[in-house]
Image (cartoon, rainbow, N blue to C red):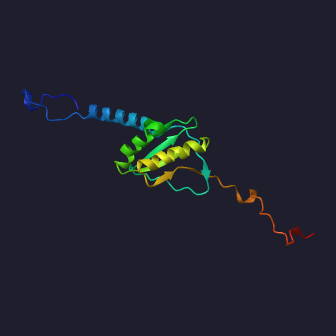
Amino acid sequence: MGMSSGNGGRNGMMAEINVTPFVDVMLVLLIIFMVTAPMMTQGLDVDLPQTRKVDVLPSEVEHLVLTITKDGSMMLDKYQTNLNTLQAQVKQNVVAAKKQLFLKADKDVPYGVVVQAMSEIRLAGVEKLGVVAEQAELPAASSQPAPPKATGTSGGKPKQ
């Protein structure tokens, strides 16, 4: 789509739109967002405890996650917090906004820190608190040890 004089040489406006620069810019922006989007979803490095049954975390944006790392630092989504400011931040960001809160604590965090955080969350007015965990890997059926067989007992002594 080059420039043309159009209309027999008169000095008029060109009726064609050159969309090539627009498409080039859009493709570059698309590539930038495709590369940076996965980096934005990654959070803090937390080694979650494992359990047999885990429900999927809701995907809607109506929830926040309180993350407690191994060293005891806390993040309420993207906001740095600690036990002293946790209650105020939960009131402002969770209770006032009527969102759900999920607790994501590293398995090596001392139990006392988790209980203190849960206490501050409760004092802030949160009634329901979800806990984030990983699905435990189930061993293969052939590698499971057989359950212990019951032996007959009489008076606390096994039968011979």
Q: Kindly tell me whether residue 129 is visible in this rendering.
A: yes
Residue at point 10%, 31% (across, down): 13
Decide: is 39 above or below 160: above
Q: Quadrant of the C terminus?
A: bottom right
Q: Quadrant of the N terminus?
A: top left
Residue 150 x/y as whole percent: 81, 68
Residue 35 x/y as whole percent: 44, 35
Tell me the quarter of the picture where residue 70 sits.
top right
Decide: is 46 above or below 158: above
Residue at point 50%, 47% (across, down): 118
Residue at point 38%, 50% (across, down): 99
Q: Residue furthest right?
A: 160
Q: Kindly tell me whether residue 105 is visible in this rendering.
A: no
Q: Count all numbered tags in the image, as a single digit.
A: 0
Q: Nearer the viewer, residue 28 or 150?
A: 150
Q: Nearer the viewer, residue 5 or 37?
A: 37
Tell me the quarter of the picture where residue 8 sits.
top left
Residue 55 x/y as whole percent: 52, 56
Q: Nearer the viewer, residue 6 or 34?
A: 34
Residue at point 16%, 29% (across, down): 4
Q: Nearer the viewer, residue 70 or 141?
A: 70
Q: On the rendered structure, is 140 left or right of 120?
A: right
Residue 41 x/y as whole percent: 45, 40
Tell me the quarter of the picture where residue 37 sits.
top left
